[in-house]
C-alpha cells in the first residue's frame, strides 16, 4: 500500500490499513514448522482477503481494484534484501551482540565497528565496507 506522491494526508490511512491487514492475518497468532509452511498459509490467506468486497468500491473485490493498479506499479527487478542495518563494535574477545545473542567474528575485527545485517534466516556481519 502506497501513498500518492506529495500527499502526506494519506499516510495515516495507509498505516491504518497495514494495521488492519496485520490483525486479519495474525490474530490469533499462528505457528508454523518452517518458512515454507508459513508462506503457503500466507498465500492462501492473501487470496481469501483479496476476494473480500472492497470497502470503498461497491460491487468490486479488493483483487479487482488491485488488478487496475497493478500495471502502474514498478516491476520487481531484483530480490529484496530486507534487513535493518545496525552498527556494532566488536569486543576485544571478537564478539558482537545482536538481538540478545553473541556471535564470533574474525580476530582482526576486534575493537572495530562493523555492520550487522539481520534477515529472516541469517545474520551477516560486514566490516570495512562503505555503505
Image (cartoon, rainbow, N blue to C red):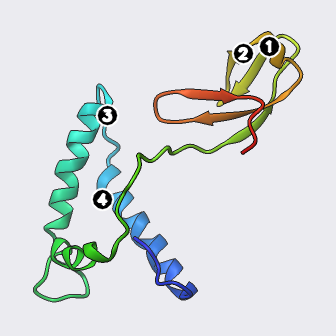
The answer to whether residue 71 of the structure is visible from this angle is yes
Q: Residues within 10 Å of mark 1 (few under 14, many from 20)?
A: some
Q: Which residue is mark 3?
A: 31
Q: Secondary structure at mark 2?
A: loop
Of residue 72 and residue 87, the one placed in the foreground of this image is 72
Instruction: Point out the frontmost of discs 3 and 2.
Output: 2
Image quarter of residue 85? top right
In-image side of 40 versus 79 (left or right): left
Residue 33 picture location, percent across and down: 29, 25
Image quarter of residue 40? top left
Q: Earlier in the sequence, mark 3 or mark 2?
A: 3
Instruction: Point out the frontmost of discs 1 and 3.
Output: 1
Q: Which label belongs to residue 24?
A: 4
Q: Contact (CB < 8 A) between labels 2 and 1?
A: yes
Q: Secondary structure at mark 1?
A: loop
> The N terminus appears in which quarter of the rendering?
bottom left
Q: Earlier in the sequence, mark 1 or mark 4?
A: 4
Q: Earlier in the sequence, mark 1 or mark 3?
A: 3
Q: Contact (CB < 8 A) between labels 1 and 3?
A: no
Measure the alpha-carbon separation of dots 1 and 4.
Answer: 44 Å
The answer to whether residue 50 is above or below residue 14 is above
Q: Earlier in the sequence, mark 2 or mark 4?
A: 4
Instruction: Point out the frontmost of discs 2 and 4.
Output: 2
Q: Which label belongs to residue 94?
A: 1
Q: Which residue is mark 2?
A: 105
Amino acid at each position: 500500500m502506497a501513498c500518492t506522491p506529495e500527499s502526506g494526508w494519506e499516510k495515516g490511512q495507509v498505516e491504518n490499513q497495514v494495521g488492519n491487514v496485520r490483525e486479519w492475518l495474525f490474530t490469533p497468532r499462528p505457528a508454523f514448522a518452517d518458512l515454507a509452511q508459513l508462506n503457503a498459509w500466507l498465500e492462501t490467506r492473501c487470496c481469501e482477503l483479496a476476494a473480500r468486497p472492497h470497502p470503498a468500491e461497491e460491487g468490486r473485490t479488493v483483487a479487482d481494484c488491485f488488478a487496475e493498479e497493478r500495471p502502474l506499479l514498478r516491476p520487481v527487478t531484483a530480490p529484496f534484501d530486507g534487513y535493518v542495518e545496525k552498527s556494532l563494535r566488536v569486543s576485544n574477545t571478537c564478539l558482537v551482540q545482536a538481538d540478545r545473542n553473541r556471535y564470533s567474528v574474525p580476530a582482526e575485527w576486534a575493537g572495530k565497528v562493523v555492520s550487522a545485517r539481520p534477515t529472516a534466516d541469517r545474520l551477516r556481519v560486514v566490516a570495512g565496507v562503505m555503505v
